[in-house]
Image (spheres, grey):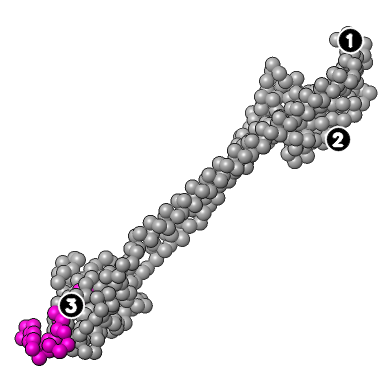
Amino acid sequence: MSVIEKSQSNSMKKLLWILRDPLWQFIGALIGLIAIAWPIIVYLEDRPIYDLQVVILSNTSLVNVTPGFDDDIDITYKGQRAKNLSVVQIRLENTGNQPIRHDSYARPIKFKFAKDATIIESSVFDSFPKNIGMEVGKIGNEAVVTPTLLNPQDRVLIRFILVDTQVADNAVPFEIDARIANVLSIGIINALEQTQPQSTRLGTFVLLGGVLVFAGLLFAIFQRLSRRAETDIIEDKVQKIIEKYDDSRDKTEPVPTLEARRVLIAYLKLVDSANYLNVPSRIDIYDYGTLRIGRDTSYCDVILDVPYISRVHARVISDSDNFVLYDEGSSSGTFVNKQPINAATGHSLIESDIINFSLLVYRFELATRLDIPSTLEELGN
């Protein structure tokens, strides 16, 4: 494997360790949701929309004669007698993103008021853009809009003056009849009703989404802190177990002689150095002792000067024929046969176990007579 491939492999391993953090898991999930939602939003925004909408701006009764006084009061408007006189103003607008062309009208837009109503005036009193060219004709209780090109966001304000009809102020005073290509129906919005504006509803949804994201972020931070606290508790327990073990040995057993302390009973043999130099090819394990492994030259017995190795990475406690490997809260962890070891209980090593310290790979072997130097040679050295 080349140096570049090793570097890429190391970067990938580091990324995987980062992604195990609950906070980064939440951020990754949030990014995934945004990645899924974004194409859907873009599609919904860019897809062709043909939509017309009518907004009722006002429905006002100008004159209303109380029943019983009909013969005593004479009301005329432009020479026409009337018992009641009311004004209805609407806004017709293209709320889609596609133009409504002249030839799109199979049947023009028609406003049908109550049967007893009479439209005495219908006109366009404003538009955007100006001079849009729309006209409104009237016949009895119906008003017909001439087919007109309406580009997206075009608006036309229309006024109707009616006589001999009574409509509640907040009621819709007409029905709409039309047939336009690609337009399923013309929506009617009564601005006189006290309804929550669409922008307010959108703001509510955005606020709710922000609250949920904030709550999820707090939960991830809490999980991260809890995990750190649990790790600290486990490390304290491991340290107490080790201290208790050392104290019990000091109290119950005689201090081992030099010969006893120097008996080689097992070792870790280097399998893969990941192309790093100055890595011990063999780590000897002696009877009745603690072997500290890490980068701290003033504290550790075995120095592994390799990236992602912690200051105090791991330790091996040997007792006759029992060998227990502990992880010392290292940043990259300690693995035996590709499985992370339990920080509290450690892992009892058996022959041929494969151990990973960061990028380095060792194999646990029991020493044979050929591996054990004589006592005289040890003392001589």
Residue 242 coordinates in the image, percent (x, y): 78, 26
The residue that label 1 is drawn on is 379
Which residue corresponds to the image point at 39% horizontal and 66% vertical from the top-left? 47
Residue 21 coordinates in the image, percent (x, y): 60, 41
Span highlighted in magenta in the image: 63-92
Q: Nearer the viewer, residue 3 or 75?
A: 75
Q: Quadrant of residue 246?
A: top right
Q: Amino acid at mark 1?
A: Leu
Q: Amino acid at mark 2?
A: Ile
The residue that label 3 is drawn on is 61
Residue 294 position (above or below residue 361): above
Q: Nearer the viewer, residue 122 or 10?
A: 122
Tell me which label, 2 or 3, sits earlier in the chain: 3
Which residue corresponds to the image point at 69% horizontal and 25% vertical from the top-left? 312
The residue that label 2 is drawn on is 350
Tell me which label, 1 or 3, sits earlier in the chain: 3
Which residue corresponds to the image point at 19% horizontal and 66% vertical from the top-left? 128
Which residue corresponds to the image point at 84% horizontal and 26% vertical from the top-left? 318
**Gap between marks 2 and 3 measured at Cα:** 96 Å
